[in-house]
Image (tube, rainbow, N blue to C red):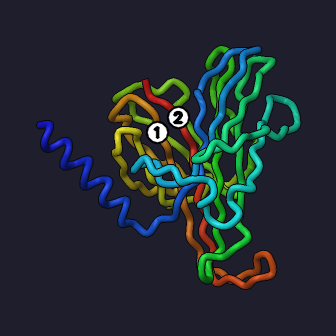
Amino acid sequence: MKILTSLFAFLTVLFYCNSSSAHALWIESAPHGTVNQSHDVKVYYGEYVTNERDQIEKWYSDVKDFTLLLYVPGKAPVKVQLTNKGDHFSGSFQPTEQGTYFLSIVKAPKDLGGQTKYEFSSLMPVVIGKSSKLDYSALKNPLQVELLNSANAKKGASLQAKITSEGKVVPNAKVSVFSSTGWGKEFVADANGVVTFDALWAGAYVLEASTFVEKAGEHEGKPYASSWQGSTTFFAVK
């Protein structure tokens, strides 16, 4: 059985290493926190499923010049100060009240990939105090992954996420589910932008939604023929 498990993990990693999907930008933080206690945040760029975390100096174009915003319940978002740690950025915030906080990044690099415009984003909820339903209504990023029932996810549970763009659902979006075990699987959202998957293992997970559109435009003074968006979210399963 151990041999079969190892072979499965190897084939999974091999598949994603050879896939044409772009690198992803993702936020890592504890999904739950405590009032008046410092809460640590990290930002990585690479391939989560293969534990590939690129050195910041090798990040694509000017991706490293992103801004991390913290959405505090009932208040305007604030910028989180970050420190370069070599293969990631590190920062923290101190919540002063209970509720659901959101960490958000949206970054469109100045350089095109051939004739394609890229946009990387990440959105992560942090529940401070008592657990409550995750409310994404105040956030309308160009592409975002919304967890529907993962605030207190447990191993073996059936989980759901909704893909939206500026507040509207994105039907048939491609969604990859990655576990810290090295497991990964690709899904397609339904007509309501919802994807359903099972939490097979305990530990950390990253969900990445992506869209690709062949539509011409201009970015940073340069014409492009198509655009790609990739958005992630991070959560934990007990």
Q: Position of residue 189 (x, y in %)?
A: 48, 55
The image quadrant of residue 154 is top left
Three-letter code, disc 1: Tyr
Count the numbered circles shown.
2
Disc 1, SS: strand
Nearer-the-camera pick, 58 or 75: 58
Asked whether the beta carbons under mark 1 and mark 2 sit within 8 Å of each other, the answer is yes
> In the rendering, at what x and y percent does residue 124 appear?
63, 39
The residue under label 2 is 235
Residue 205 is marked as 1
Quarter of the image for residue 132 reads top right
Residue type at mark 2? Answer: Phe
Disc marking residue 166: none
- At a point 51% along the width and 57% down the height, the residue shown is 191
For label 2, count other residues whose C-alpha is less than 10 Å away and answer few (under 14), some (14-19) or many (20+).
many
- 27 left or right of 3? right
Quadrant containing the N terminus is top left
Looking at the image, residue 45 sits to the left or right of residue 238; the answer is right
For the C terminus, the quadrant is top left
Q: Name which residue lies at 32% across and 60% down.
A: 15
Neighbours of disc 1 within 10 Å: few (<14), some (14-19), many (20+): many
Residue 233's place in the image compared with 73, above or below, is below
Observer-nearest of 134 and 69: 69
Q: Nearer the viewer, residue 183 or 153?
A: 183
The residue shown at (61%, 46%) is: 86
Placement of 113 over or under 173, stated as above or below: below
